[in-house]
Image (tube, rainbow, N blue to C red):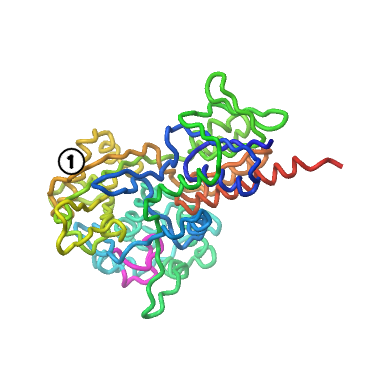
Amino acid sequence: MTRVLVVGGGVSGLAAAHRLRTLLGPDAELVVVEAARTLGGKLSALEIGGRRVDVGAEAFLARRPEAAERIAELGLGDQLVHPGRAASSLQVGGRRTALPPRTMMGVPGDPDVAADALSPAGLAALREDRPGPWEPGGDVAVGALVRERLGDEVADRLVDPLLGGVYAGHADGLGLRATVPALAAALDADPRSLLAAARSCLPAPPVEGAPPLPVFGTLRGSLADLPATLALAARAELRLGRTVTALSRTPTGWRAELGENEPIDADAVVLAVPAPALRRLLADHAPDAARAAGEVELASTALVVLALPAAAAAPLAGRSGVLVGAGERRPDGLPWTIKAATFSSEKWPHLAVSDPARPDPDDTAVLRLSIGRHGDAASLAALRRDDDDLVSAARSDLAALTGIEEVPVESAVVRWPGGLPQYGVGHVERVAALEAGVAALPGLAVAGATLHGVGVPACLATADAAARRVADHLARSAQPRA
């Protein structure tokens, strides 16, 4: 009987196991090993204020097809939901302003859309759209490129908050080629204007009168239902609370050590684990690949979730959330602890207060307050606070943003140490070296957020690719030799 081992029980590993089941059929033996005692990785949810709220990733990018297609394949299509019409905003320049529409990760195609977020001098620098050197196929920090061509304010007030929201990193530390690949490709084609490059990447505006296409999607019960459903559909043996400490080759495949006297022999292995674990498990078999994995840094974050009395959340009406620019100061001159606030009960119709005009005294509104930027000393200090202190700091920021000082009905802190890989300059080359090293090892494949994107669709794409690589290898191995 064919046996495949999947190391990692996050969405990437479980999606790989599910795809392997569809490719290999009902008789294949699939084993998923996960170091944590729960499945799902960064797709996690908890009950708070009588509602089930995502406390990891809360949504996926709807313009990529992989997530919606897999949701339909799993029979969850009737659970797919999209954000309502509440507006997002930025806290920049000491004030709150609307998030500019139609930008490429903060880089506008039209300077006019960013006028409210910039000072007159910042808008003038944006309009100037200075030309600069560009090496086709090369890479550069997003922040450096934007500062050189469009000015510091565009980098700090528009690009950095958006990249911080996705990667928990800084624009000056993230590489363009991996984080905004479409913009890099547009500059390869014509490097003269960054504004024109951004404009060429934007989808056509919606037809007048037609509803705009949704940007994000999630599941009504929570996005954590996706890995749970993948696990059921994969029908794999699950070994939780186990860490693969070593991999070794065998005459017919691979052996994984799960601690003392607990080996698993398999015909093939999928590694769907963070970069440090990839480095460790590949070190003896593909040193160059292990070295590349070891160069991927990780960001740590925390999430403070609050359930407020519904009546207290009235000031949030029509607002889906706020992104806070790095280096911004509160009205009292103190630095912000949070980098983003998501007003979940305004953003998502399925979490909405039942009757905003006459809220039930027992009804609640839920909010998510995000903390943590890679390489930021203040963020690191905040993450070292205990849970009570972190809740107090987040509530203080919420009051400064919205005026809401109400004591929450319930609160929770969820921490994600090393939860987000940082796609620095040269990340594409690092991943190429990683994948080339693995390609030379028969019966081994890799998947996950370390590779080609941190979002759910990108992780699903790597999982499918890994499963097909393994299935192809097993099919070739089963063919009789001439």
Residue occupying image coordinates x 57% and y 27%: 246
| Residue corresponding to mark 1 | 392
Residue occupying image coordinates x 28% and y 54%: 342
Q: Quadrant of residue 128?
A: bottom left
Residue 302, given in percent of the width and then of the height, sits at 31, 41
Q: Quadrant of residue 56?
A: top left
- In the rendered structure, the answer to whether residue 187 lies left or right of residue 80 reads right
Q: Residue furthest top?
A: 260
In this rendered view, identify the residue nearer to me: 349 or 258.
Answer: 349
For label 1, count other residues whose C-alpha is less than 10 Å away and answer few (under 14), some (14-19) or many (20+). few
Please indicate, yes or no, whether residue 171 appears anywhere in the rendered image: no
Q: Residue furthest right?
A: 482
The quadrant the C terminus occupies is top right
- Give above or below for 261 relative to 143: above
- In the rendered structure, the answer to whether residue 175 lies left or right of residue 336 reads right
Q: Which residues are magenta?
A: 99-113
SS class, disc 1: helix
Q: Amino acid at mark 1?
A: Ser
Check if residue 110 falls in the magenta segment.
yes
Residue 350, given in percent of the width and then of the height, sits at 31, 58
In this rendered view, identify the residue nearer to me: 369 or 104.
Answer: 369
Q: Residue furthest bottom?
A: 208
The quadrant the N terminus occupies is top right
- What is the tally of numbered marks visible in this picture? 1
Residue 39, given in percent of the width and then of the height, sits at 45, 39
Residue occupying image coordinates x 64% and y 29%: 265
Check if residue 372 falls in the magenta segment.
no
- In the rendered structure, the answer to whether residue 376 lies left or right of residue 197 reads left
